[in-house]
Amino acid sequence: MNVLIIGANGMLGKDLMTVFASHNPTGVDREEMDITDPMAVNMKLDEILPDVVINASGYTAVDMAEGPDGQQEAIAINGIGVGTLAEACAKRGMPLVHFSTDYVFDGAKNGEYKESDSPAPINHYGESKLLGETLLQKYCTKFYLIRTSWLYGKYGKNFVQTMIDLGKKGQQLTVVNDQIGKPTWTYDLAESVHSLIVELRPFGIYHLVNEDAVSWYDFAVEIFQELEMEVDVLPVSTEEFVRPARRPQNSALANTKFPLLRSHKDALRNYLSTL
């Protein structure tokens, strides 16, 4: 199987390259294939002729997306660029795997969000990701649209590493305790994507996350407990921790179409052992 992984140098992309190693994947980053450039997209697809395309690229600066420059870049990469890629893949009959986010939901639901629930983002980042979802489904029929959440991994900036770095400084930390979601290890996500493809699962929308919803505060406490680090962590409300972009209070995703991934606690323990 000839696999093309876009965004191969990113946190998720590197784990995808590892998991798909037996398929001799071709990894490209923005310098080699800019999905906002239709000519570059078409030329690279014709050069590589992949059996499946995995788009792990994206604009992920949630707060910066609230500014005019960030908003424009987010729309170009997360929205229009995905449409360009979807249209090019569709013309060649190439299945496309694309990643979206829990932030396409408003967080007001009493319960976990299913794949069939209607998105309603409350920040510009979420709006850009929803645009990508919409264009993907408009242009392409052979797609896996994967929503995931709260990603962390070995190869990029993430909440787990931020907590560890701050904890080592011995200072008191304040962490939001009224935003709920499912932290997900990029390696577990990559393995699930591999299974999704090789098992020839039906095309469509999937929610792939490590299980057991938790608040950011409780997740931080779990990190320090696993590492046996004594860190003073104080819970605060979203109102007390003001940031440019609004966050959904409940963004827990329900996986109803694929075998459940393991608990985020087991994944975290495994991840920390690899550091």
Image (cartoon, rainbow, N blue to C red):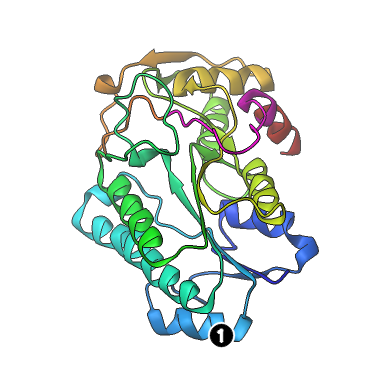
Query: From this viewpoint, which residue is outermost toward the right?
Result: 22
Most common SS among magenta residues:
loop
Q: Which residue is mark 1?
A: 46
Which of the two residues, 203 or 161, is positioned nearer the viewer here? 203
Q: Residue at x 64, y 25 (%)?
A: 263
Which of the two residues, 267 or 112, is positioned nearer the viewer here? 112
Decide: is 238 above or below 85: above
Which of the two residues, 247 or 148, is positioned nearer the viewer here? 148
In the rendered structure, the answer to whether residue 30 lies left or right of residue 154 reads: left
Choose top left, top right, bottom left or bottom right for residue 174. Answer: top left
Which of the two residues, 24 or 207, is positioned nearer the viewer here? 207
Choose top left, top right, bottom left or bottom right for residue 266. Answer: top right
Q: Residue at x 19, y 56 (%)?
A: 68
In the rendered structure, the answer to whether residue 160 lies left or right of residue 196 reads: left
In the rendered structure, the answer to whether residue 75 lies left or right of residue 164 reads: left
Instruction: State the image coordinates of residue 134 (x, y, percent, origin top left).
Output: 33, 56
Q: How many marks?
A: 1
Pointer 1 local density, CA inside 10 Å: few below 14, some 14–19, many at least 20 = few
Instruction: State the image coordinates of residue 125 (x, y, percent, origin top left).
Output: 31, 48
Decide: is 117 above or below 60: above
**Viewport quadrant of the N terminus:** bottom right
Mark 1 lies on a secondary structure that is helix
Instruction: State the image coordinates of residue 219 (x, y, percent, origin top left).
Output: 53, 22
Q: Residue at x 80, y 62 (%)?
A: 22
| 102 in the magenta segment | no
Please state the extent of the stretch shown in magenta in the rendering: 252-267
Query: From this viewpoint, which residue is outermost toward the left?
Result: 68
**Viewport quadrant of the C terminus:** top right
Dot 1 amino acid type: Asp
